[in-house]
Amino acid sequence: MSELDRTYRIGPIYLAPTIQPRHGWSFLVAAFFSIGLMIFISIGQTYILNEHLGVAEEIQGTISGQLVFLTEIVTLLLFLPAGVLMDRIGRRGVYAAGFLILALTYALYPLAESVEALYLYRIIYAIGVVAVAGGLSTVLADYPAERSRGKLVAIVGVLSGLGVVLISQGLGSLPRVFTDAGFDGVMAGRITHFIVAGLAVSVALLIFWGLKPGAPVARKARLSVRQLFIGGFAQARNPRILLAYSSAFIARGDQSVNAIFLVLWGTLAGKAAGMDSAAAVLSGTMIFVMAQIAALVWAPILGPMIDRIDRVTGMAICMALAALGNLGVLALSDPLSAIGPVFFILLGIGQISVYLGGQSLIGQEAPVAQRGSVLGAFNVAGAIGILLITPIGGFLFDRVDPRAPFVIVGIINVMLMFASIYVRMRFPTDRTTDAAHKPTQS
């Protein structure tokens, strides 16, 4: 048996040809840290606005929103070029560089002497996010054998969720540890950020050592840069890829809605019930945590199921679950009521379902030679989802009803459920063999 035909396993996961166990294990470690190190910016930024810069509370929300908007604009512009770069030079270098850029951001952030400096550093951060998020999704598409794709997507989803919880809780508590040890607030923030930067550098070194080097196809088989730029969106002529792009649009929007409006809804309900600010924020946070725990529990259940059925059939089921969760909140008038946890569990299950369904489908359908650019377009669709759904949801939250953002997402879930059924009936081809996606050695 040639090396090209030999397949390996890591636990229950069968790897694609040429992917060795070292590559797989290294990727799982990187996946654990990827999302957590990207979102730590929110925790660190809140600390810096209050402790380092002394920004008035009444304008912190506006500043934070503007910084997020700036990040999404940059990612929207750069996801596709980053995907093209990964197709040309390989995943390993871009993915590792992303962590180094995040490290630079975390080294600079606590040194900011004005809000304007944060805007500049946020652009640097956005470049790192593009490289890390693009590397994560593309390697996730590269590494599993087709029969294990859903399982690996589920495991990465669980690891990412655990990484978010542990990094945000563990590293987020360091400023208090350092102030209790006698450091002033500013120095405590700087030490914390420098530790996060060092961790990001360590992950970059692991990626460069552990992931498979080189581009996924032989040099003579590589497409031109122009073909790759065009190909990312041209592949949408494949109805299954177009459906996957649509799932990315709503999946990122759904994640944003849950992260922002679940916490806000619970917080406002707590204040209306007479809680003080700290208790109200805690009640809103616990609602979001409840949904995330449900997602973590559901992911390893759904992943193997997706591997046993057509990916588009799986997408229809995932959209139905998401629609149930998002539209179900219409029956919930008070998020703090005793029956509330049922609805938040359904929201968490729906959110992770759409993520798993979309990642499994795009990983199967994206051609190896264009996988980076296709995943770049996939991530662009997700960024557009956040840019459109979040402000519209916020407007409806304030002017109509706190449940309105979830209803908007639920309606789109229903539309994509029917789109999935149509694609499944009209374009029934399901490439379930690993041979269809076997890479060419460089």
Image (cartoon, grey):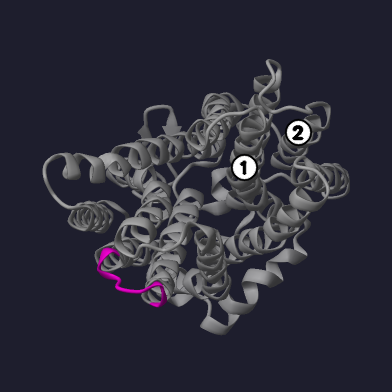
Identify the residue under disc 2. Answer: 317
Q: Amino acid at mark 1?
A: Leu
The spot of residue 263 in percent (x, y) is: 59, 39
Quarter of the figure with the C terminus: bottom left
Local crowd at mark 1 within 10 Å, few (<14), some, or many (≥20)?
many
Callout in the foreground (1, 2)? 1
Left or right of 205 in this view: 219: right
Farthest residue, direction top: 338
User: Which picture quadrant has residue 326?
Assistant: top right
User: Which picture quadrant has residue 366?
Assistant: bottom right
Q: Earlier in the sequence, mark 1 or mark 2?
A: 1
In front here: 291 or 381? 291
Left or right of 363 in this view: 127: left
Q: What residue lies at 58% left-to-right and 50% top-to-bottom?
A: 363
Q: What residue lies at 18% left-to-right and 44% top-to-bottom?
A: 179
User: Which picture quadrant has residue 373?
Assistant: bottom right
In front here: 407 or 271? 271
Identify the residue under disc 1. Answer: 264
Q: Which residues are magenta?
A: 110-116
The spot of residue 5 in percent (x, y) is: 41, 46
Q: Which mark is residue 122?
A: none
The spot of residue 133 in percent (x, y) is: 46, 58
Q: Is residue 229 above or below residue 146?
A: below
Asked whether residue 181 appears in the rendered view, the answer is: yes
Asked whether residue 243 appears in the rendered view, the answer is: no
